[in-house]
Amino acid sequence: MSEKMWGEEPFWGLGYEWDPDWVLTERQKELRALLIELCEQEMRANAKRSDDELLFPRRNLELLGEHGFLGLTVPEEYGGLGQNHVGFSMVCETIARYGCASTAMCYVMHIGAVMAIMYRPTDELIDKYIRPLRSGKIGTLSYSDPETGSHFWYPISSGAERSNGGYKVRKKASWTTSAGFADFYVVQTTSPDFSGYDDLSVWIVDGEDAQAQPSLWDALGLRGNQSGPLEVPDVEIPSEQLIGPIGDGAASNDEIVDPFFLIGSSSVWNGIALGTIDIAKRHTTRKRHVDVGMRVADYPTIQDYVGECLMDTNASRLFVMSIAQAMDKETDDNTKALAVGDVARANFLHWAWQIKFEAAKNVANVVDKMLHACGGSGYKRDMELERYLRDGKAGWVMGPTNEVLRQFVGKAVLLGFEALDYWNQSYNRRAVENEIKKLDADGKRELAEQLVAQAAEEEAKALAASG
Ligand SMILES: Cc1cc2nc3c(=O)[nH]c(=O)nc-3n(C[C@H](O)[C@H](O)[C@H](O)COP(=O)(O)OP(=O)(O)OC[C@H]3O[C@@H](n4cnc5c(N)ncnc54)[C@H](O)[C@@H]3O)c2cc1C
């Protein structure tokens, strides 16, 4: 096994013997070595500037573009690197571990946007957005809505209508990574001819048509990723910039946006966890206590911290890689064209929820433990550990949040997938009957009258609409 290098020197963190290299192809190992080189030469130093100055990691993303990584999962015939889901996981983990977590998160959202286009590719979309990726063009996903918080699949403050042969699209997003810096935004709104919140459509909005206020962004960690609010104010969009058919949004979420976001972001949390273990190894093997003649790394307590954190993190990495492999198998290594109605990655969505939960839970613990292992020295900014700690804390709160995910999984296990009721459509008879039991006769009568009046109003509206 070759030695992991950091410039001219052997790498000061964990060597390749602790990386699950049997899941990678030779090409993927070459790409990883190239990324580590880019991180050593420039990307890691830029991470500090992004964090200190709330600076969008433009230069790091340009570097990734120059080396083809912005088209990582795009077929080679369109200028991409033709990589699969495992390759994507490796790239996200590597950028976060050795380079810059903010860059890694912008990258995850970028690939999510690129793959939303590649899900329903057209010649126009490929020429305009995919072929120029090497020049450093960046996309992102704008889904979260101010009215529904982390329920990002529920875009209340949005809509679209037919206009001048194209569409007029409006969207308010409370958070959008790379907001104000991206060249294109993949956004989701309710469909024209709105028929309910499960009727969603996906659009590409060019950078000049979206309004962002980067100056409002300031956060604990991932400070360079610029996840500020975004607004698309009733913008005229040509029909070519509708991705897929009207109403394709829910399928696009399950097949592309969620799988790529969940694999990519889980890999970022794993990369951050590994980055802190690397730093802890460097520090604890160098720091000596002269009184007892020991290095910090010689204390069994510190060895226990590192051993447990590495095993937990490798369990999470292998979990992510395994789901990535399942998606590779189902999509012939990310080459299968899916017609409307076809399902591949979405078969593993409930597995993808689990990897994000585990990776985000693990990183929150590992960054704390590695701080404890490094002591007060780790608390100071010069060691970089505290930046990883702050960056890693984003994992738990990013949608789908870990609270939502454990509910999804527990509820689906106990009550079935239909009980998840994303769009608040199924009637919970048990809850309603239980509440009604609490009313006396007058209360019941009042409720009944209210319901009859509501039903009459809805019927009248439906009658007026039909004719
Ligand atoms: C660094 C960062 C980058 C981001 N980038 C993007 C992006 O590029 N694009 C994008 O669209 N969004 C992005 N987001 C937004 C993200 O996906 C969430 O929408 C956002 O973090 C939710 O924050 P909130 O304050 O609205 O949380 P809330 O939804 O108000 O949640 C508050 C609390 O309630 C809990 N909660 C919410 N719903 C439930 C439920 N059903 N059951 C149990 N508990 C529940 C939550 O888990 C949390 O503990 C980003 C967020 C972060 C932190």
Image (cartoon, grey):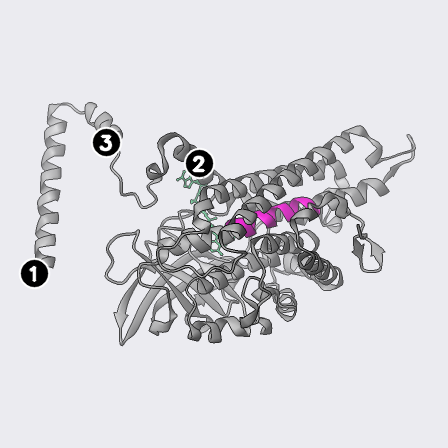
Chain part drawn in magenta: 262-275
What residue do we see at 80% from left, 53% from top?
2
Q: Tell me the crowding category of disc 2: few under 14, some 14 to 19, or many 20 or more residues within 10 angstroms, Cα based.
A: some
Distance of label 1 from label 3 (alpha carbons): 33 Å
Q: Where does residue 447 sit, x and y in percent of width and height?
A: 14, 33
> Is 266 covered by the magenta stretch?
yes
For the residue labelled by badge 3, is the local secondary structure a helix, a strand or a loop? Answer: helix
**Which secondary structure, mark 2?**
helix
Q: Is residue 304 above or below residue 260?
A: above
Instruction: Name the amino acid type tagged 2.
Output: Val
Q: Nearer the viewer, residue 399 or 385?
A: 399
Regarding residue 161, the answer to whether it shows in the image is yes
Closer to the camera in the image, 180 or 161: 161
Q: Amino acid at mark 3?
A: Arg
Amino acid identity at mark 1: Gly
Q: Residue beneath label 3, please?
A: 429
Q: Nearer the viewer, residue 112 or 441?
A: 112
Looking at marks 1 and 3 on the same chain, the residue that comes earlier in the sequence is marked by 3
180 left or right of 459?
Answer: right
| The magenta stretch spans residue 458 | no
Crowd tier of the residue under label 1, counting other residues whose Cα lies within 10 Å: few below 14, some 14–19, many 20 or above: few
- Residue designated by label 1: 467
Q: Is mark 3 within 8 Å of ligand 1?
A: no
Which corner quadrant of the image does residue 444 belong to?
top left
Q: Which residue is mark 2?
A: 409
In space, the residues marked 3 and 2 are separated at their CA atoms by 22 Å
